[in-house]
Image (spheres, coloured by chain):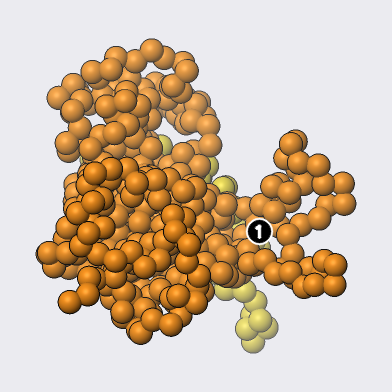
Chain colours: A yellow, B orange
Amino acid sequence: MSSSSRFEPKIVGFICKWCTSAAADLAGVSRLKYQPNVVSLRVMCSSRVDPEHILQAFKGGADGVLVGGCHPGDCHYQVGNYQTRKRIMMLLEILKDMGISPTRLRLEWISASEGAKFQDTMNEFINTIRELGPLGLKVK
Amino acid sequence: MSKPKVALYWCSSCGGCEESVVDLAQDILPVTSAVDIIFWPVAMDFKYSDIEVLQDGEIAATLINGAIRMDEQEHIAKLLRKKSQLIIAHGSCAHLGGVVGLANFYKREDVLGEAFKEVPTVKNPKGILPQVKTEEAGRELELPALHDTVKTLDQVVQVDYYIPGCPPPPELIKNAFAAILENKLPPKGTVLAEKKALCDSCSRKESKPDKIKLSKFKRLYEVEWDPEKCFLEEGIICLGPSTRDGCGERCIKANFPCRGCFGPTDEVLDQGAKSLSYLASLIDSDDEEEVKKIIDSIPDMAGLFYRYSLASSILRGNINRGTK
């Protein structure tokens, strides 16, 4: 197979139970295919994702991390996704100093009805990270 | 019976931790009468060979301060580990990497270049950098080699206890010596300070409102703050919520916000990540552009949040810095 030499990125997806995870289910039952590079972890709310989790994912070998939540105004817990956005924006600043391209961390709003958006986002993110190459964490 | 032997050593540090031992003042007398200090390069004349001749485990306890960033330091740390029953990381640099650990944001070459070529007070037209071996008048001179990465003590040798702080308060050192002498030490791996965060005992805790909402992070020169009020309420970044208690509020009592020298509590892996997490939730805006503006009011975020703990953080610094 020609893809055997191709770099296959490892992606960790933190997806919220109420929206993005439901979208993943919708993509599944709709038989929408996307590349198998993502390991998705369902969390109750995107704001449950501690910046520590994201750093730990990079340290553990992830080449990219995607956090998926509800659209602004739609959070099951009212304001969780707004808190997430603030944290991710701040973490992106820190990642620059840590030598990690901000492209490797993405925050996306995908609602329960957007199965196709889930498929597109995952494919697009995986392709972006594949182009970017491995994270290349040298020091354990 | 001979007295238990104690050794003190310094690695990459400023000397403040040595000073913290001297700061014991008269409390050092019961310590020195109960133990034999057999190695303390900063205060007394010893040679490394004095350690090499000891039996394994002959030293009861060794306090090592400073981070490990040169091969000589690594060598002595390993030697002292072999000869000591207890190794105690003394101070922020040995415990967390400390301020010197901030070098992990840069490559080794950049650190050396900055220090020996770029600094305005340095005149180095030939661009000479420290070499491990040099010839001088027919003799070969040696210097310790600088590593690519600043390491905490426990990344190099097994550490039994930690005395946190930059520098540690004399009280904690006194308690640690007492615990060793009376054999009343907690389980190994314990940080010999409080378990909770600094806010828990902060004298300004009562002034903290239920909800803090900030539309700007202020720098110290921008505001005249109330010495009774919670710093965060005033918009000044204080790392109390993500920092271990036990310092006796030295900075807070001097009307200065916490900068995190005691490191994170046991439950926290990454002090910087935790700090950004709680500070982000204080931002009083849901508008992306406004949030960006508020975040931009914090200069050098990574340097501030990881001031003492970069070398012990999850990523341990810039991931492109080097390999050793």
Q: Is residue B184 left or right of residue B322?
A: left
**Residue sitting at x 32%, y 23%:** B255
Looking at the rendered structure, the secondary structure element under dot 1 is helix
Label 1 marks a residue whose chain is B
Residue B132 visible, this angle: yes
- Picture quadrant of residue A23: bottom left
Q: Position of residue B285 (x, y in %)?
A: 38, 25
The answer to whether residue B282 is visible is: no
Q: Residue at x 35, y 84 (%)?
A: B56
The amino acid sitting under disc 1 is: Arg
Which image quarter is the N terminus of chain A in? bottom right
- Left or right: where B307 falls relative to B192: right
Q: Position of residue B105 (x, y in %)?
A: 57, 51
Residue A63 at x, y = what percent? 53, 64
Q: Residue at x 69, y 47 (%)?
A: B115
Q: Nearer the viewer, residue B22 or B190?
A: B22
